[in-house]
Image (spheres, rainbow, N blue to C red):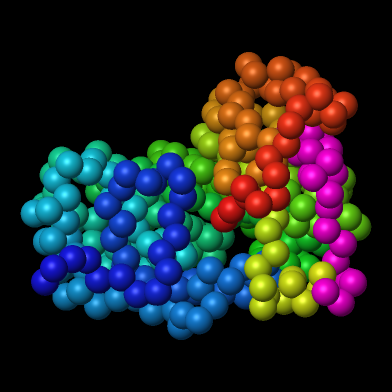
């Protein structure tokens, strides 16, 4: 074998850039969100043990300089508990130097595991879960076909934290369109406050060709926000986000104004920066520089 086994395009959070990417699932078990095309051509499957074992063996021999592992694809946390325990045990046995294992999780995968099961995963090195909330607004979540209510999403997020893992929550500016912009911003801030995660990652909506949301935009059923309106939405969301500690990142490649805010200490300063930008005194990132 001359490398790791990967199927299709691979996605990982920016903070996992220096991690061993171990593909344990292909695709996303939900795969219905109107804005996402990340896993659209992939039928969700869990990879067989032999392939996963071979990749762990390869990484243990060739990637010893990397201290973290990230399990991909979309929501690997939905893997049945015994198989997930087996994967984590094998990582620990073959790569004892690994400091942390990370994973994508959705509400179904998280809520499908008991507190004891999550604690067992934590005990075997699962240290962080990346969770796509997208919005805290009931109507927006229903419209984008996320599959859960804000209440269930909050419950899932809090469950990860209660298990002693770190939680990084992703939300999307502009996902409510012009119709629900401020409602989306306020409800998302309130949901983030209720979860109180370690990290918040704010992305800005980018329309992917061929998605249901793309069809809605072209059909005039979804109005996109201007860069200025995106900043207004971010300001409103930030004002309504009250977390006890953690980082609020709006520095993803899709964002117009990169911000990294230590909460709650830097919140006021960040709101002032947004006000300066809204007054036209800050140069925003041009459209061609934005990326997923």
Q: Which corner quadrant holds the N terminus?
A: bottom left
What predominant SS class does the magenta segment belong to? helix
Please report the residue visible at 31 percent of the width from the left and 57 percent of the height from the top: 21
Residue 57 position in % (x across, y down): 11, 61
The correct choice, above or below, for 94 with respect to 238 in the image is below
User: Residue, x 25% and y 78% (percent of image)?
Assistant: 48
Find residue 255 and report its horizontal and vertical position in percent. 66, 44
Left or right of 220? Residue 98 is left
Q: Which residues are magenta?
A: 218-238
Q: x, y percentage for residue 49?
A: 21, 74
Q: Is residue 194 above or below residue 29?
A: above
Residue 113 shows in this picture: no
Quadrant position of the C terminus in the picture:
bottom right
Q: Is residue 220 magenta?
A: yes
Circle count:
0
Q: Is residue 182 above or below residue 199?
A: below
Question: Is 234 rendered above or below residue 71?
Answer: above
Closer-to-camera residue (113/230): 230
**Residue 37 in view here:** yes
Quarter of the image where one finds residue 88: bottom left
- Could you tell me which residue is drawn at 81 percent across and 24 percent down? 281
Q: In the rendering, at what x and y percent does residue 55 appear? A: 19, 65
Query: Along the horizontal axis of the image, is 87 left or right of 75?
Result: left
């Amino acid at each position: 074998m001359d490398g790791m086994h990967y199927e299709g395009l691979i996605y990982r959070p920016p903070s996992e850039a220096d991690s061993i990417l171990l593909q344990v699932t292909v695709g996303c078990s939900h795969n219905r969100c109107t804005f996402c095309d990340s896993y659209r051509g992939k039928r969700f499957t869990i990879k067989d043990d032999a392939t996963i074992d071979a990749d762990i063996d390869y990484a243990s021999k060739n990637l010893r300089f990397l201290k973290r592992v990230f399990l991909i694809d979309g929501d690997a946390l939905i893997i049945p508990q015994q198989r997930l325990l087996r994967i984590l045990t094998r990582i620990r046995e073959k790569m004892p130097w690994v400091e942390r294992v990370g994973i994508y999780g959705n509400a179904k995968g998280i809520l499908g595991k008991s507190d004891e099961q999550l604690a067992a995963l934590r005990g075997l090195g699962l240290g962080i879960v990346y969770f796509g909330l997208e919005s805290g607004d009931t109507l927006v979540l229903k419209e984008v076909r996320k599959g859960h209510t804000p209440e269930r999403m909050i419950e899932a997020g809090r469950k990860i934290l209660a298990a002693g893992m770190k939680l990084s929550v992703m939300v999307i500016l502009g996902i409510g369109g012009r119709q629900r912009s401020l409602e989306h911003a306020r409800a998302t801030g309130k949901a983030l406050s209720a979860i109180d995660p370690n990290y918040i990652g704010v992305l800005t909506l980018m329309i992917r060709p061929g998605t249901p949301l793309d069809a809605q935009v072209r059909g005039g059923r979804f109005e996109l926000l201007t860069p200025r309106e995106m900043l207004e939405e971010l300001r409103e969301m930030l004002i309504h986000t009250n977390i006890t500690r953690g980082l609020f990142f709006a520095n993803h490649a899709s964002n117009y104004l990169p911000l990294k805010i230590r909460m709650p200490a830097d919140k006021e300063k960040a709101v002032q920066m947004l006000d300066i930008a809204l007054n036209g005194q800050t140069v925003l990132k041009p459209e061609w520089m934005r990326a997923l």
